[in-house]
Image (tube, rainbow, N blue to C red):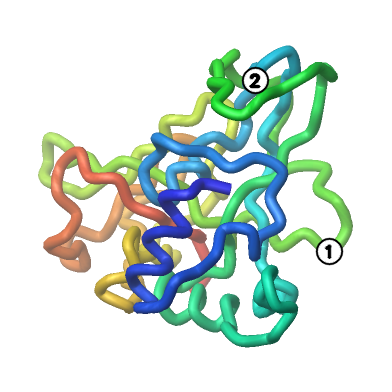
Amino acid sequence: INLASVQALSEAAGSYVDPTRFRGNLFLEDLPAWGEFSMIGRRYRIGEAEIEMTRPARRCAATTVDPATADTDLNVPVILRKLTGHLYCGIYARVTKTGRIDVNDKLEDLGPWDGDPNQNLPERTPEPGEWPRFVRVAVSDNGKTVLQNLSENWPLVPGSAGDEVRLHPITGRPAKMARLKLAEDADAQALVLDADKSVAELSEGAWVLVSGPYSV
């Protein structure tokens, strides 16, 4: 669980969201809000253990329960959907090497793991097109807005020119998704947006959350 993501959710909701609602095994600091989604497909060492980040965690009604009182008092999935346009918070990891870990241990990036995180998913896992991906904005030589995927082995979902992608608020404000169309076919590392449909917030070097493409 990325504590910055939970903090951003709390600020957008105007109500404190306890990170323990998400029942995480590890709480991470020093990441930008929603930056955990950029870790999928990579290996990490923490203490004596090693883990592989596999997919984002879609949240359910269990997060509506206050972990201190067991009262159902905050509809976290609805808050997520309204303020971010998606239902994900935190990511799953699998242990590849057992070992002791301690509070304040650092994550050491070991590079990408073998395979495609979009493939061989557990049953009932949402389609990868729904997963929010943390990507960087660039402007091409011809002035088109490009969303760059910097993950070596977590490819973007294939899409065709005219398909729709959705941009999600990083902080929950403004509480509205933007729906944009692809100007070109998607490849594993880039989504080129229709120049006439770009939005002012997409400045060079900015980080955004994107899902899709979706055929229209």
- Left of 155 or right of it: where is 32? left
- Left of 2 or right of it: where is 113? right
Measure the alpha-carbon separation of dots 1 and 2.
29 Å
Residue 191 drawn above or below residue 169: above
Which labelled disc corresponds to residue 46?
2
- Left of 149 or right of it: where is 58? right
Q: Disc 2 on helix, strand or loop?
A: strand
Specify the amino acid type for callout 2: Ile
Q: Position of residue 161 (x, y in %)?
A: 40, 58
Which one is in front, 72 or 39? Answer: 72
Q: Which residue is mark 1?
A: 124
Write the residue at 65% across / 75% down: 66
Specify the amino acid type for callout 1: Arg
Residue 58 drawn above or below residue 95: below
Write the residue at 42% across / 31% down: 150
Question: Which of label 1 and label 2 is nearer to you?
Answer: 2
Which one is in front, 202 or 42? Answer: 42
Q: Are marks 1 and 2 in contact (CB under 8 Å)?
A: no
